Image (cartoon, rainbow, N blue to C red):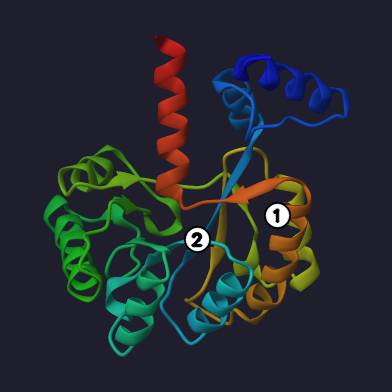
Amino acid sequence: MGRSGWIAVVTIVSLAAGHIAVAVTGAGDRELAARKEKLVALTFDGGPSGYTPKIDRILQRKHVRASFFWVGGRIDGWGKVVRRVARQGHEIANHSWFHDDLTGLSADQVRSQLARTNRRISRLTGERPRLFRPPYGAVNGQVREIAANLGMRTVLWDADSLDWTGPGCERIAALVRQRVHHRSIVLLHDGGGDRRQTVCALPRIVRDLRSRGYRFVTVSKLLNKKRRRTDAAQR
């Protein structure tokens, strides 16, 4: 029997056993497995702070990559942490300079905050942020346009952990579990207040989502995969 016949037999046996033999089946089966894959992005706002290294250690131990949206004015004194987080494969993005509601500022003020934060992050990591999240999720056309002109895509979230309200470690994990779906962006915090509950909840969040078949990716990777799928569907 030729090689193609052998692959067909393995595919039949694997499907009968309830599995997809991605490593030995054809391109069609690999695409089917990819379509069924569930993705989620964990994001952390408001840092860096003393909680950031604790969160980073948990993520490293669990082999999870995440996205950090940081406030430029809070970066001073945390250079080593910023560089380490970037070096370990996490994504660092822009969360303004002062954490103001940018919709109430002039165009020049918004541009100044975003550009200044970009410069600070770029000096430490060697890379300019590609993503921007407005403080409080407050955004309008002007803010989006300025971010875009600076080379950044504006990103919000769809699964709020409410960790910023201090509901307790178990409640934070439960809310994420209830609200996450395929391609969710989860809102958590590593700065801007007491984040001990977030640190406590994080291992449970990772364990819960992983047990449900989710794979953790950065926001940029999540968006890129969604874009590729959309492009393919339109062909």
Q: Nearer the viewer, residue 1 or 15?
A: 1
Quadrant holding the C terminus: top left
Which residue type does callout 1 highlight? Val
Give the secondary structure at mark 1: helix
Q: Is residue 212 left or right of residue 191?
A: right
Quadrant holding the N terminus: top right
Where is mark 1, residue-wise? Answer: 176
Residue 133 position within the rendered picture, expressed as x and y whole percent measured from the top left: 38, 54
Q: Is residue 30 left or right of residue 14?
A: left
> Total number of numbered labels?
2
Which disc is residue 210 wearing?
none
Residue 27 position within the rendered picture, expressed as x and y whole percent measured from the top left: 55, 22
Marks 2 and 1, how far apart at CA: 15 Å
Where is mark 2, residue-wise? Answer: 66
Residue 86 position within the rendered picture, expressed as x and y whole percent measured from the top left: 36, 70
Looking at the image, which residue sits at the far top?
Answer: 235
